Amino acid sequence: MPALVAGGSPASGSSALTVPANDSPEAGFARDMATHHQQAVDLSFIVRDRTTDQPTRTLAFDIINTQANQRGMMMGWLDQWGLPQHSTAKPMAWMSMSMGGHGHGADYQAHDGSLMPGMATNAQLAKLRTLDGREAEVFFLQLMLEHHKGGVDMAQGYVDMARNESEKRLAQTMVIGQSSEIELITDMLKERGAAPGVPAS
């Protein structure tokens, strides 16, 4: 990513942008997706300690490694831009800046710790911590399936409005990677004779 100069022109190259504003889609996407990713990492750490099933643990490790790395990149961009890592803006507010938003994300109503589409609630996180073995695997897979669907919606929303090529490429990587994992998780649930939806609490 070319170096950017606050309030001025790119330090190198002609296609880079000036530093995004604090209320820009770039900053909003970086903050919100970092939060979304952190919960995926948290869910994966929980299930890692609740089951010995190797396919589930492998998926959890992959999510931990991939999403922790991507989260670090987004936090690094905010630091590079000289912007705070947290904002008082409503989650998903940046999505309303493009054609009234993308999908249902811009209109999402946060509840019980579920700040953005696909995120698990505090109650669901607490439940996962009480389960072991096959029950933990299935509930994790159900939660992660919804989590990835929400993540893909958010990432595609940013791709559709992106002005920052580095973030756009990362968002496209998220869409491709999480879409592939959605197929894997769906198959894993079928193998366990479980429905894809998260059971009502």
Image (tube, rainbow, N blue to C red):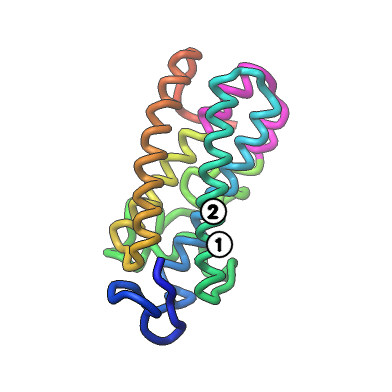
Circle 2 SS class: helix
Considering depth in this image, is 125 or 70 the residue closer to the camera? 70
Task: Name the residue type under label 2.
Answer: Arg
* Image coordinates for residue 198, horizontal then vertical, percent: 51, 30
At x 53%, y 45%, the residue is 67
For residue 14, above or below residue 166: below
Q: Which mark is residue 184?
A: none
Name the amino acid, label 1. Met
Q: Is residue 177 magenta?
A: no
Residue sitting at the far bottom: 8
Which residue bears the numbered disc 1? 75
Report the quarter where the N terminus lies. Answer: bottom left
Which secondary structure, mark 1? helix
Q: Determine whether 49 is above or below 35 in the image.
A: above
x and y percentages locating residue 84 in the rendered image: 58, 72
Residue 83 vertical position relative to residue 191 in the rendered view, above or below: below
Q: Is residue 125 above or below residue 188?
A: below
Please give left or right for residue 143 compared with residue 125 in the image: left
Local crowd at mark 2 within 10 Å, few (<14), some, or many (≥20)? many
Q: CA distance from mark 2 to mark 1?
A: 6 Å
Mark 1 is surrounded, within 10 Å at the Cα level, by few (under 14), some (14 to 19) or many (20 or more) other residues, namely some
* Residue, disc 2: 71
- The majority secondary structure of the magenta stretch comes to helix
**Residue under the point 56% across and 27% down:** 58
| Highlighted magenta segment, given as a residue range | 123-143
